[in-house]
Image: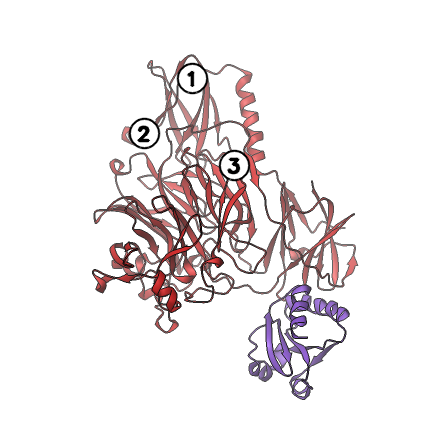
Chain colours: A red, B purple
């Protein structure tokens, strides 16, 4: 059998990081390192090339300070003082790329040591800052963290627009700092097209993963940390034909699902669809927010142009912010608001993202504005449209709504993002507005989503613009190449543990991958499929991912044949139209390239992997083991 | 009983009783898979008539029946459409739809 199928086996990143950590901690103990001869590990957790760990011991308990020196002058220095100890394992964060970084370690007694950490070039296609307008005084030690919406990577930019943090793993969707200082974001592990990943990960700024929370319906778009540490995560039930219409509360320590909200229980699925709605993705939930004063959850549903609020305990619908056109009359009367105040300048939001409730009880979101109408006859072309951050004041007694702030309408198509994006509330009058999905073709806002545009086409420009506005004055603006899902301004260091040692945990579980009961007749052939099919089988602890290329209309099925049982998975080789694409991370350049995640959940023992292509059953020569 | 029909054959068919009409395309992977599923169903329900029609070669008929894609299964009772299922389905879902019209 010639070797036409490629097989790759990986340990989970958590395992690889644990191995790397064991190695450098063992090496550190082999001899005595002092502040004069510190032990330096560049990129200790393998996925952040702009960081290091500096380790040494002191005879006295002291609180060391690490300073990453600025490229040009002292005011750019990035210092952080760590807790007092005799053994020091200090994260060095925010290094410049392709640069001999000067890092000073100093002790309270005046002892100081300068070391040089040379970094390499970042990948060629990293999204660069094009323009930045701010000052060191304004941004202080904050970086702007942007999460990817395509093949780009999570990246953070300093006040000069220099990249000071990046992960080489395509962790997707929202990024938020947890109460313990770590960050929570989506895992980079593919599960289902178009963009479901296995779950949510908690990691530190070095890139060390502490926990991956796997979910049966996978993770997409957003999550929210509750006061007790438990996590609200957006997901779905993959045993039915709809997506992006469930939220779960998961136990922070165990990953167990504690509570589930199924939107089909409080919303009709066949009314008031946005221009992007289909029966499969009828709601397209892209944000979740918990509001403590009202003990309620707020969800943004792009495909109903609706921001929906429900009671946390009962799951009963409280209200809906959105254009009431197309909704049943009894729902309009009960749940929708009537605009008041300056109604001439009032606009409803359409295909919005990232809805939140301000401390004053107002509703904010990024109003993408895609189509900007409920009725097809009134749809607006993107080049004539606008996107904006918007804040609505709602009176739930009178069911009245007033638009009290917006930013972006005045910028027209220049600021238009048909998808993704977010707003952040810092204080009354102080907001971040991230228009991360700008896509131009031939100089005009294109009608396609940025994820579908070819960034290599010279006529295409993908942009991300992030603005901070305070009391009507723009204090910060960052323009980068590429599209980015969300922006979050964060200091890279925090006042809790910036690193903790010990192996990370893989929590929760994946779903049992749906199988196909009928197995087509096919002639067994003792050979691998043709090399043209480009079959790659990846395996890790809890799943395998099958990659292959097929002409449209091919009958294709993956067969796992074991001694005791067999399992069969149909591969759909038809053209699939994705109306929504909030991350193009898993899109292939050649749309004949397919991938299928097969969870090991429900499988046991050793399986030969065979592949039916039309009337032949090929043996890939690969077997997997499921514990 | 699975039988291939064209427009003429469909029009001349005695439509009394229950039947299923499937539109397929020769260039459709799910349609090829569905053919195996239907063969399986045919073994379990040999008296239930299943007709298959080539989507690409019967333009007027598909327009008349409002068929816009493939595969699609129309469930007819005495000539009246009572249900339709779009896309590849597993055997139990199709058997359930058949049982509902029997």
The location of residue A129, given as percent across then percent down, is 35, 46
Which of the numbered marks, if any, corresponds to residue A436? none
Lateral position of residue A91 relative to residue A622, left or right: left
Q: Assess disc 2: are there few (<14), some (14-19) or many (≥20) residues with their C-alpha within 10 Å of its C-alpha.
A: some
Indicate whether B57 appears above or below A307.
below
Q: Residue at horizontal 53%, vertical 48%? A: A197
Q: Secondary structure at mark 2?
A: loop
Residue at coordinates 38% horizontally, 26% vertically from top-left?
A: A103
Where residue A338 sits: x, y (%)? 28, 63
Residue A122 visible in the displayed image: no
Viewer-nearest residue: A405 or B99: B99
Tag 3 secondary structure: strand
Residue A180 placement, left or right of A399:
right
Chain under label 3?
A: A
Q: Is residue A251 above or below residue A84?
A: below
Sort mark 1 into few (<14), some (14-19) or many (20+) by Cα contacts within 10 Å: some
From the viewer's perspective, is the residue at label 3 or at label 1 nearer?
Answer: 3
- Image side of residue B4 versus residue B87, left or right: right
Q: Position of residue A234 (x, y in %)?
A: 47, 49
Q: Residue furthest top?
A: A59
Q: Position of residue A500 (x, y in %)?
A: 48, 28
Circle 1 SS class: strand
Mark 3 Cα-neighbour bin, 10 Å: few <14, some 14–19, many ≥20? many
What is the distance, in whole Å, between disc 3 and disc 1 at their CAs?
A: 26 Å
Question: What's the distance in space between the residues labelled 3 and 2, CA to CA?
Answer: 32 Å
Q: Which residue is mark 1?
A: A85
Q: Earlier in the sequence, mark 3 or mark 1?
A: 1
Q: Which residue is the site of mark 3?
A: A211
> What chain is tagged by disc 2?
A
Give the position of the C terminus of chain A as an image quadrant: top right
Q: Which of the two discs, 1 and 2, sits closer to the camera? A: 1
Residue indicated by mark 2: A77
């Amino acid at each position: 059998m010639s070797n036409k199928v490629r097989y790759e086996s990986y340990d989970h990143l958590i395992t690889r990081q644990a191995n790397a950590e064991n190695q450098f901690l063992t090496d550190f103990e082999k001899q005595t390192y002092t502040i004069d001869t510190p032990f330096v590990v560049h990129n200790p957790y393998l996925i952040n090339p702009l960081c290091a760990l500096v380790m040494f011991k002191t005879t006295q308990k002291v609180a060391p300070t690490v300073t990453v020196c600025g490229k040009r002058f002292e005011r750019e220095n990035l210092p952080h003082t760590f807790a007092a100890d005799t053994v020091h394992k200090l994260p060095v964060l925010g290094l410049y790329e392709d640069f001999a970084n000067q890092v000073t370690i100093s002790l309270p007694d005046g002892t100081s040591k300068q070391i040089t950490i040379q970094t390499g070039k970042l990948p060629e296609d990293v999204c660069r800052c094009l323009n930045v307008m701010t000052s060191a005084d304004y941004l202080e030690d904050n970086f702007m963290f942007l999460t990817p919406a395509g093949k780009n990577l999570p990246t953070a930019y300093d006040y000069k627009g220099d990249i000071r943090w990046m992960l080489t793993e395509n962790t997707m969707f929202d990024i938020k700092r947890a109460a313990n200082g770590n960050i929570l974001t989506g895992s980079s592990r593919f599960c289902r097209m178009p963009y479901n990943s296995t779950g949510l990960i908690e990691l530190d700024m070095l890139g060390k993963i502490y926990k991956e929370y796997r979910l049966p319906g996978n993770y997409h778009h957003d999550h929210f940390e509750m006061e007790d540490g438990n996590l609200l995560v957006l997901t779905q039930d993959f045993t039915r034909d709809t997506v992006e219409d469930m939220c779960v509360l998961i136990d922070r320590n165990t990953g167990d699902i504690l509570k589930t909200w199924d939107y089909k229980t409080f919303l009709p699925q066949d009314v008031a669809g946005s221009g992007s709605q289909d029966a499969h993705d009828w709601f397209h939930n892209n944000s979740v927010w918990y509001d403590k004063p009202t003990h309620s959850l707020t969800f943004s549903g792009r495909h109903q142009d609706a921001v929906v609020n429900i009671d946390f305990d009962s799951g009963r619908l409280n209200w809906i912010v959105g254009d009431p056109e197309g909704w049943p009359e009894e729902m309009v009367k009960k749940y929708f608001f009537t605009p008041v105040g300056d109604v001439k300048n009032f606009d409803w939001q359409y295909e919005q993202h990232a809805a939140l409730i301000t401390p004053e009880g107002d509703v904010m979101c990024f109003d993408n504005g895609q189509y900007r109408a409920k009725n097809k006859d009134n749809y607006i072309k993107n080049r004539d449209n606008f996107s904006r951050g918007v804040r609505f004041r709602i009176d739930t007694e009178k069911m009245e709504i007033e638009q009290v702030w917006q930013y972006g309408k005045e910028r027209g198509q220049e600021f238009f993002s048909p998808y993704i994006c977010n707003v952040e509330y810092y204080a009354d009058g102080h907001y971040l507005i991230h228009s991360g999905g700008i896509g131009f073709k031939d100089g005009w806002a294109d009608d396609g989503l940025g994820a579908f545009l070819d960034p290599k086409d010279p006529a295409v420009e993908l942009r991300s613009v992030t603005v901070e506005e305070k009391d009507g004055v723009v204090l910060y603006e960052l323009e980068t190449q590429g599209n980015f899902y969300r922006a979050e301004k964060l200091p890279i260091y925090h006042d809790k543990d910036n690193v903790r040692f010990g192996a990370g945990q893989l929590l929760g579980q994946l779903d049992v991958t749906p199988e196909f009961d009928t197995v087509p007749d096919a002639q067994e052939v003792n050979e691998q499929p043709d090399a043209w099919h480009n079959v790659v089988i990846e395996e890790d602890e809890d799943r395998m991912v099958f990659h292959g290329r097929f002409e449209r209309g091919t009958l294709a099925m993956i067969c796992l044949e074991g001694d005791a049982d067999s399992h069969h998975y149909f591969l759909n080789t038809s053209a699939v139209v994705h109306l929504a694409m909030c991350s193009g991370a898993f899109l292939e350049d050649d749309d004949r390239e397919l991938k299928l995640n097969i969870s090991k959940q429900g499988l046991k023992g050793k399986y030969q992997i065979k592949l039916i292509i039309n009337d032949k059953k090929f043996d890939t020569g690969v077997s997997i083991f499921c514990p | 009983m699975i039988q291939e029909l064209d427009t003429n054959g469909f029009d001349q068919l005695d439509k009394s009783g229950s039947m299923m009409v499937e539109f397929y395309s020769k260039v459709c992977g799910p349609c090829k898979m569905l053919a195996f599923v239907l063969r399986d169903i045919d073994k379990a329900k040999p008296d239930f008539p299943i007709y298959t029609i080539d989507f690409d070669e019967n333009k007027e008929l598909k327009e008349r029946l409002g068929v816009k894609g493939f595969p699609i299964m129309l469930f007819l009772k005495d000539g009246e459409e009572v249900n339709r299922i779009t896309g590849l389905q597993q055997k139990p879902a199709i058997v359930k739809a058949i049982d509902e019209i029997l």
